[in-house]
Image (tube, grey):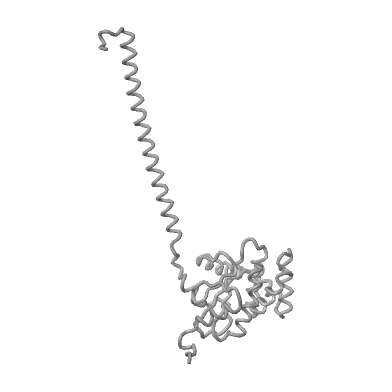
Amino acid sequence: MSEENLTKKEIYDLKKSEADREHANASKTRKAKRVLMWVGVLILLIGAVWGMVKLSDKPSDTGQAMVLSSVLSDDWIKGDKETKVILIEYGDFQCPACAAYHPLVEKLIAEHGKDFQFVYRHFPLQQHANAKPAAYASEAAGKQGKFWEMYNLIYPRQNDWSEKKNADDIFLEYAGSLGLNLDQFKKDRDSQEAKDKVKKDYDSGIANKVNATPTFFLNGKKIQPQSYEEFANFIKQAQPAENTTPTQ
């Protein structure tokens, strides 16, 4: 139908309808452009976040392998200091599993101590209120040459102090039983040096992805033996070839 046969009102309505369609199409186009823009922004944000996560997953340049396969100057060490076989434990004095592993480690040292070095590092878990005080007490005892003696009191007697509000007093009693100078013990226990040492151990554990206790590393490789026999076998397998007796 031509416009000549339409009334003025019909012509007006027709043109208005065409204008409305053009406006609607333009609006759709603008909306589509906005959607594309925000999709682009979202993709960029996701890419940026992914990149940050990947960066955070990269190993830190803190000598990670060295820390796990070498003994540091301030490490607490048992066993043969000349051997290159190094067993490191990240432990929490209040952790029941660590207390359960303690006699296995002591037996391993007693029976195979000439074959490896045992290194103990602190990894006090946040949910254990007395883990840090216990660690500080052991460090204070260590200042008077009795770290391992305190270590061998704290773990076997874990049930006596782990849930007590006066754990510091109990550790002070342990210090007395070891013949330590108690004034010096208290000073060293409360010192920034003790806190820094425990934090240094903890931070090295975090850097090496320790997330539970006890965690063991043998020559830099994470192991989790389930029995004394497995422990002893790991130590045997780690011996340098020249130290092993050839099979006849």
Residue beneath the point at 41% across and 51% down: 48
Residue beneath the point at 46% across and 88% down: 242
Number of labelled discs?
0
Q: Nearer the viewer, residue 239 or 172?
A: 239
Report which quarter residue 179 is drawn in. bottom right
Q: Position of residue 146 (x, y in %)?
A: 65, 79
Residue beneath the point at 59% across and 79% down: 229
Q: Is residue 143 visible?
A: no
Q: Furthest residue to the bottom?
A: 248
Q: Is residue 245 left or right of residue 135?
A: left
Q: Position of residue 61 (x, y in %)?
A: 43, 67
Q: Position of residue 197 (x, y in %)?
A: 57, 70
**Depicted 204 relative to depicted 247: above or below:** above
Report which quarter residue 128 is drawn in. bottom right
Q: Position of residue 51 (x, y in %)?
A: 41, 54
Quarter of the picture holding the N terminus: top left
**Depicted 205 relative to depicted 113: above or below:** above
Q: Is residue 151 left or right of residue 54?
A: right
Q: Is residue 101 visible?
A: yes
Report which quarter residue 125 is drawn in. bottom right
**Depicted 107 relative to depicted 68: above or below:** below
